[in-house]
Amino acid sequence: MKTNYLSFFLLLGILLNGNSLFAQSTEDFESEATSGTTFTDSGQNFTITNGAGESTYDIEFFSNGGWNGTAVDNKFIDNSSGTPTQNDGTSFIITTTDGTDITIKSLYIFVSTRALANPSSTLTIVGKKDGEVTPVFTITKNSGFSNVETFSPNNGFTLIDFSTEGGIDNSDKNVDELIISATANGDYLALDALTWGAEVLSTNNFEFEQNKAKIFPNPSSDRITVSGLKKDENYKIYNVLGTEIIDGIIANNKKIDIKNLTSGMYFLKFENGNSIKFLKE
């Protein structure tokens, strides 16, 4: 019993510091295909889509034209190709290709006129998920940009820190779509050093009460048994990056085979919204 309580409080402590559970990665686009409209980082596929009236957003190569967060680099997303109309702003969209929820930690954005002059423009970044009309968050910025004429600081790129920008912490809010736009003569946008993390599952997602679903043994190397179910439940198992690994239907006190999973932490999520974390040894 003492061991069970120790495990419970250890797990609760980990959950309350949930960011430590999830991988975080920075995409600097250096290994991505030039002119591509998709990219892959840490196993997650992303898609770049043009905003209304746009047609040229893709991965650009320009020697020393980007910023990876600490130094200049060569590749980034932008709309430098073609001859779009001017003084009407611009926009593009980044989505997880498979709809996986992620969190956005920070990015670097270059905002200018087509002539690479400092614009009089408002930058808006909208996070959405599951195709909902109502945004998860909206960040608006109309001052405090890097100087694109002197390329200072950060090679002209402005840091957008999602934990502080706008005075609100949006860095742990789950999204699958990021819409980036500028108004007026902010006709050119370049994005580099996109730092993102996996979906955050709060303590509200987990059921600890004695009369709720539980799994045992935990950790396990081959099978887990699910108890406390009142009826058959649809379930899915996700890894810490939010990738679905297994799905099926489970009845009370029945087993799920996890032999083929690699060692690590996973989440058993039921269709009713409840989730349980387990370790595969």
Image: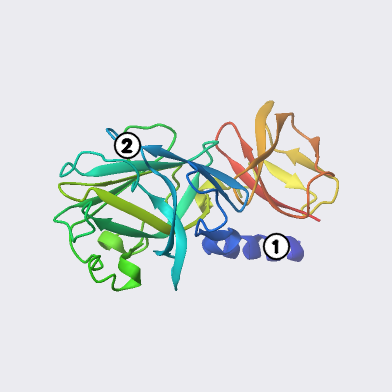
Give left or right: position of 245 versus 273.
Answer: right
Residue sitting at x 73%, y 45%: 215
* Residue under label 1: 7
Name which of mark 2 and mark 1 comes first in the sequence: 1
Q: Percent position (x, y) of residue 77?
A: 41, 51
Quarter of the image with the N terminus is bottom right
On the picture, is 275 further left or further right than 191?
right
Q: Residue drawn at (38%, 55%), measured in percent from left and top? A: 191
Residue at disc 1, secondary structure: helix
* Amino acid at dot 1: Ser
Rendered location of residue 128, percent (x, y): 38, 40
Residue at horizontal 17 percent and vertical 57 percent from the top: 119
Count the marks: how many? 2
| Cβ atoms at labels 2 and 1 below 8 Å apart | no
Query: From the viewer's perspective, is residue 261 above or below residue 67?
Result: above
In this picture the colour scheme is rainbow
- Vertical side of 12 occupied by 259: above or below: above
Badge 1: few (under 14), some or many (20 or more) residues near its Cα, within 10 Å? few
Quadrant location, the C terminus = bottom right
The residue to which callout 2 is attached is 51
